[in-house]
Structures are given as structure tokens and as C-alpha cells.
Amino acid sequence: MTTHLALLRGINVSGHSMIKMEVLKTTLEAIGFQNVQTYIQSGNVFIDTEEENAAAVGFKIKQEIFKVFGHEVPVVVIDKVDLEDCLKNNPFLKDKEVDSKKLYVAFISTTLSSNSMNDLRISQFKPDEASIDGNKIFIKYAVGAGKTRFDQKYIEKKLNVIATIRNWNTVIQLLKMYEER
């Protein structure tokens, strides 16, 4: 049995693509996922399955959400190592004065190349900062996530990927939950 963490993008935000987590849990259990556990309304879902392929799990979840709820919801599936790497590799944690409320991680549907940073043109968004690490982009917003154009839509458009962003506190909580499973 493999535990996956499905990160759903764009649900329950500003009244769009509304899905109650309890109903989502029941829906995913009905298609064979086990030990389904959700965290907050923004679409963080732990599941256990015999399927080891993360992309296949994401596709199955995406299909079922469309079938049951009628919402086209992108899904990025990660594992415990991805979350552990966030703690180990976030370059912004080296700054002892960093405000963790301004730290975010964009989880990407594929591993990014070293050229991806150039493709993002992050220099246009100074003083926001970003750093790529495989299938993650660490982001430090100067003011906050709500006051920037360097967001998930921009990342997806520039890199032609699916991305979903979580704040640092959520990343920490998801890792704790993974460890408790």
C-alpha cells in the first residue's frame, strides 16, 4: 500500500469549485482509495492505494471529481519525500529573520529543468524571490501572496505545467500528518 498526497488546485476559493471535504472523502473511498484523510478546505487529500504511479492516482482523482462534482480540477500528487525535501532544501529558511507567512511552495506536475528559472523571468517580480528544486518552486513574497502577479497562473503559463501553491504553514502541517499516518 502506498500513501499519496493529492493537492487539488483551485477548489473552495472565493466560492468557486465548491467541494465539501467530507463528500470528497466519501467519493474517493467509493472508487477504492483507503484511509482517505483531508486537511483544510483547500484540497489536501491523503490516500492509500495499491497504485504506486502518482500521475495515475492524480488522473483517477481528477476524473472522479469531474464525474461527481462537474469541476475540472487539476491535481498534483506528491509523497512524503517531496515534503521532507521542502524542509531540507528551502533556501529561504537560511535567513533567520524570514517571515514564514511570506513563504510558499509551488508543487509542479513535472520535474523542472535548470532553464526553467530563466523561463519564469522572476526578475520581473522583484522583490519577490523564487528558487527551483526539481518539482517544487520555493517562493518568498516581499509583501504577500495576494499582492503579487507571480502566482500559480503565471507559473503554469510560463512553464506549461500544472502548479498548485501551498503556504509554508500548510507544508509543515502536511508533513506532520504524513508522519502520523
Image (spheres, grey):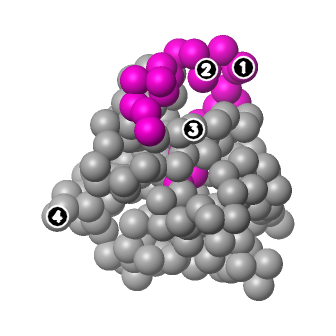
Label 1: how many Cα within 10 Å (few below 14, some 14–19, many 20+): few
Q: Marks 1 and 4, Cα distance to the nearest angstrom?
A: 37 Å
C-alpha distance separating marks 1 and 2: 5 Å
Give the amino acid at mark 2.
Ser
- Furthest residue toward front: 97
Badge 3 crowding class, 10 Å Cα cut-off, few under 14, some 14 to 19, many 20 or more, is: many
The answer to whether 25 appears left or right of 118 in the picture is left
Specify the label residue 116 is tagged with: 2
Are dots 1 and 2 in contact, CB under 8 Å?
yes
The residue lying furthest to the left in this view is 15
Q: Which residues are magenta?
A: 104-127
Residue 96 in the image, given as x and y percentages of width and height: 69, 65
Secondary structure at numbered mark 1: loop
Q: Is residue 119 magenta?
A: yes
According to the picture, the residue beneath numbered tag 4 turns out to be 15
Q: CA gap, disc 3 to disc 2?
A: 11 Å
Mark 3 near mark 4, Cβ–Cβ under 8 Å?
Answer: no
The residue that mark 1 highlights is 114
Viewer-proximal residue among 86 and 10: 86
Q: Can residue 114 be seen from the camera position used here?
A: yes
- Identify which residue is drawn at 40% across, 24% down: 124
Amino acid type indicated by mark 1: Ser
Quarter of image, res 130? top right
What kind of residue is marked 3? Ala
Please name the residue that numbered disc 3 is placed on.
Answer: 130
